[in-house]
Image (cartoon, helix red, strand yellow):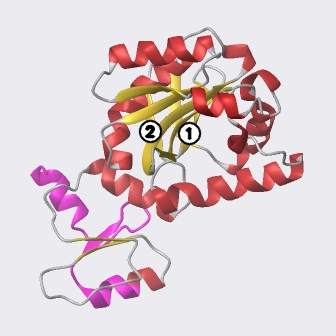
Amino acid sequence: MDQYTRSRIMKEKDFRKDCLLTDSPVLARQTAARGLPVIYYERPGAEPVYEADYTVQSLDDLDELFFQRVYERHYGLPWCIGETERLKIRESTEEDVEKLLELFSDAEAVRWLFDEEKENYSREEQREKLEAYVRNRYAFFGYGFYSVLLKTTGELAAWAGFQEREYHGKTVLEFGYLTAAAFRKQGIATEAAGILVREMEELTGETQAYLFCHPDNQPSRRTAEKLCALYPEHFQTVVDQEKADSRKL
């Protein structure tokens, strides 16, 4: 961390602009009680402060982005994951729910999801699930699926990201996406994956994700092949014939 950053973040003032970073348990609790964002630097042998937003045991890896994200999480603001010239990827918000409902009501978008991924919920039940997802998922897991927005218009082009999945008796990280009808065949999924693969380890703690494809979904398989060619150390494709066959029973 450079000297300017260190001196700025160590201030114990201007709480709305920056988070408070302190090694004082008393000050940390007092500040948290005021509803302000607190990062507690817990020195060896010091008492824990459960009221703090985050507890760290070293200052070495703290950077501007860390403090920004602590601040945003505290105030319920969506994290921006990354941008290209065309796209912006950020955490989904409750304002996105209607657009996400439209995406999930698109038969072509969800056609190739396996049965356990597209349970027969009513629209209101789906709305409640999505609202709960955007309220809780990111804060609890630190990652999830994200809104992929066209920067020029703010339109929702896709929903893409990471989730857990059972595979061969173990839990693995899956990368997936759903692309809105108006934006298919425009390289949206590949472009979004390029952003997310760079952030994958920081967000999830994993360096590799699986892409599960239905054997008959040729566009998805082509995208998966492209991603595996571009990022061979980070993506692995699984053509899930077993689950595809189970749908026919």
Is 3 one of the magenta-colored residues?
yes
Q: Is residue 189 above or below residue 102?
A: above
Locate residue 114: give its quadrant: top right
Residue at horizontal 18 percent and vertical 88 percent from the top: 46
**Disc with the residue nearer the chain's start (1 vs 2):** 2
Residue that numbered label 1 is attached to: 146
Q: Is residue 45 above or below residue 231?
A: below
Within 10 Å of the Cα at label 2, are there few (<14), some (14-19), or many (20+) other Cα atoms? Answer: some
Image coordinates for residue 3, horizontal then vertical, percent: 10, 53
> The residue tagged with tag 2: helix, strand or loop?
strand
Please report the bounds of the magenta region as a residue range: 1-30
Q: What kind of residue is marked 1?
A: Tyr
Image coordinates for residue 192, horizontal then vertical, percent: 49, 25
Q: What kind of residue is marked 2?
A: Ile
Evaluate whether residue 113 shows in this view.
no
Q: Is residue 225 above or below residue 128?
A: above
Q: Is residue 55 above or below residue 244?
A: below
- For the residue pair 70 and 203, the one nearer the viewer reads as 203
Residue that numbered label 2 is attached to: 81
Question: Which part of the image, by quadrant, shows the C terminus?
Answer: top right
Image coordinates for residue 30, horizontal then vertical, percent: 39, 87
- For the residue pair 47 and 3, the one nearer the viewer reads as 47
Judged left or right of residue 23, residue 82 is: right
Within 10 Å of the Cα at label 1, are there few (<14), some (14-19), or many (20+) other Cα atoms? Answer: many
Real-space CA distance between mark 1 and mark 2, rounded to the nearest whole angstrom = 8 Å
Which label sits in the foreground, 1 or 2? 1
Is 207 one of the magenta-colored residues?
no
Image coordinates for residue 78, horizontal then vertical, percent: 54, 49
Labelled disc at residue 132 = none
Circle 1/circle 2 CB separation < 8 Å: yes
